[in-house]
Amino acid sequence: MPLFGFGRPALPFPHPWNYRDPLKIFETFYCGAEKATGSGKHNRYLYVAGFPPVLLSRDPGIIKAVLGATGDKPGQFDRDTSPTRGIARATGEDSLLYSNGEIWRRQKRLSAEPFSRSNLFQPEKFHGFEQTFRQTVAERLGALRSRQQASGEKVIRIELEPEIKVVMLEMLVNNFFGGRVSYEELRERFVPGLVFLIDHMVSDTVAPITQALSRMLTGRHAILKQKQADFEILTDIALSGRLEGLGLWSQFKSDATDEALRSNIRVFLAGAMEATTSFASWAISHLSHAPHIQEQIYEEVKDMSVYDPNNLASAATLNRVLEETLRLTPALYFLPRRATVDTWVETADHRKMLIPKGTHVRLDVWHANRCEEFWGKAVTGYPAEAFAPERWEVLAKKGITSRDMLHFGFGHGPRFCPGRFLGLLEVGLVVGAVVKIFKFKAVGERTEARAGVSTKPGDGVLVDLELRS
Ligand code: HEM
């Protein structure tokens, strides 16, 4: 595709004036794509003299093939670190998220056991976490309930995303890492600090020099230093449970020093809060436009007092809502890769594509999952751009599962998300508990997406909230 063109939503690369709208940058790649035939319809190359090529793909077959061929073996794709430089500067270069090759392999081995399905979803261990998670969620929603009762109003208007963020960080820091931070301190100090830093990570990736200059001129430099210091304190708190074997630490067997674990802990704290908040916020946002689905979930959870793996599995609508949420509005909207050598990739239906060495590959999950050709009416019974959990029932009747129809909500292949089971547990609990206590209705007719490190509902999940009687 050419670098410039008329009538496009943005320039096809991030710069200081458009980087806050990355979904528009990606959209630009598909301008005129409908006229392309063959693989050019969904796989778009940008060549600029003197720079390595950029390949954007919304082709699920290619996305799957590239993800499957990513790893530490010679000739495999690396995770492209260029879109996450700001994250690395804030969290460390040797984290599981940022590193490649041998360091990545070592970090992956270290985190495998505590995050595994067999660990988290084994009934005994699950109960341990589930009880503490549930207590946390119940306390926070109890506070929200009291706020509503005290207001004397039947309905209160509220942005739910900020509330969700605190609960998510609380579950991570206190329940998962065994820390002891008060709700007030999380809310007033650590959550705003992380939000500031996450925003900084994005601008620090796109325009590090202009950002640094503007910080110096506006006095924001001192604020950044303060937030970074708070982040280190939170990391110390998460690590402090290790000696006593609190929370997840009881499952962690390694002689790695605390220092060697710091980058990963920082990534888990910032990344997991961001991803789980995105996931839960989108699920609640979608439900706020679909009262009838809220009622179906309510019927499933109203008498559920224990959320064990069997109970959760039996909540079919809730599970379909979570699946559909990740499909339509994935937290991570693109997965970056880099070809380390000239690489032929082959899709399951035997299409082949050569990706030249050095290519920056952007696997555009957001647009792949909204493409009518792959997810539309003809395939799933519902338009691709609609939130329709029922499509999973249609697919199931055809004998197709989410393993066959990949939406890449947790990635795929060797660099698959290690926090998947933890995230699903947390988000399932929060969404189930909110539906059990409240009815909620979106204030706006449509909710637009905003995207930074992850995607979020543009209105902060602004809803009219009503207590169930
Ligand atoms: C529930 C919400 C979550 C979603 C939707 C999510 C999504 C993802 C996705 C799509 C990837 C793949 C990235 C890629 O292939 O480039 C990923 C990787 C990762 N996730 Fe998650 N994640 C979630 C929760 C978590 C949690 C709770 C943690 C940790 C506590 C976590 C830690 C990580 C790490 C460290 C990686 C990098 C793994 C590697 O490169 O080997 N995530 N996540």
Image: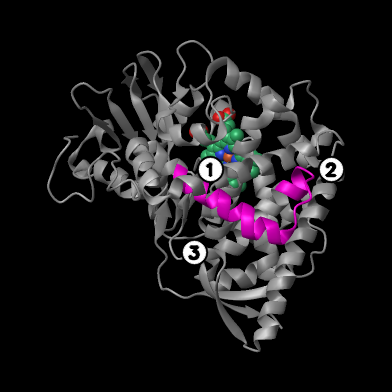
Closer to us: 469 or 4: 4
Element under disc 1: helix
Tag 3: amino acid: Gly
The part of the image, by quadrant, that contains residue 268 is: top right
Q: Which numbered disc, 3 or 2, marks the residue that appears first in the sequence?
A: 2
Query: Where is 399 relative to 149, above or below?
Result: above
Question: Label 3 to label 1, Cα distance in Å?
Answer: 27 Å
- Residue 41 percent coordinates (x, y): 26, 38
In front: mark 3 or mark 1?
1
Badge 2 density bin: few <14, some 14–19, many ≥20, Cα 10 Å = few
Residue 225 numbered mark, or none: 1
- Residue 291 percent coordinates (x, y): 55, 74
Q: Which residue is mark 2?
A: 125
Question: Label 2 to label 1, Cα distance in Å?
Answer: 39 Å
Badge 3 density bin: few <14, some 14–19, many ≥20, Cα 10 Å = some
Magenta segment, which residues? 173-200
Tag 1: amino acid: Lys
Q: Magenta includes 194?
A: yes
Quadrant that contains the C terminus: bottom right
Q: Which residue is mark 3?
A: 460
Q: Main secondary structure of the magenta part?
A: helix
Number of marks drawn: 3
The part of the image, by quadrant, that contains residue 283 is: bottom right
Q: Residue at x 42, y 60 (%)?
A: 386
- Residue 95 percent coordinates (x, y): 59, 28
Would residue 214 be found to the left or right of residue 79 on screen?
Answer: left
Closer to us: 212 or 164: 212
Would residue 464 be found to the left or right of residue 335 on screen?
Answer: right
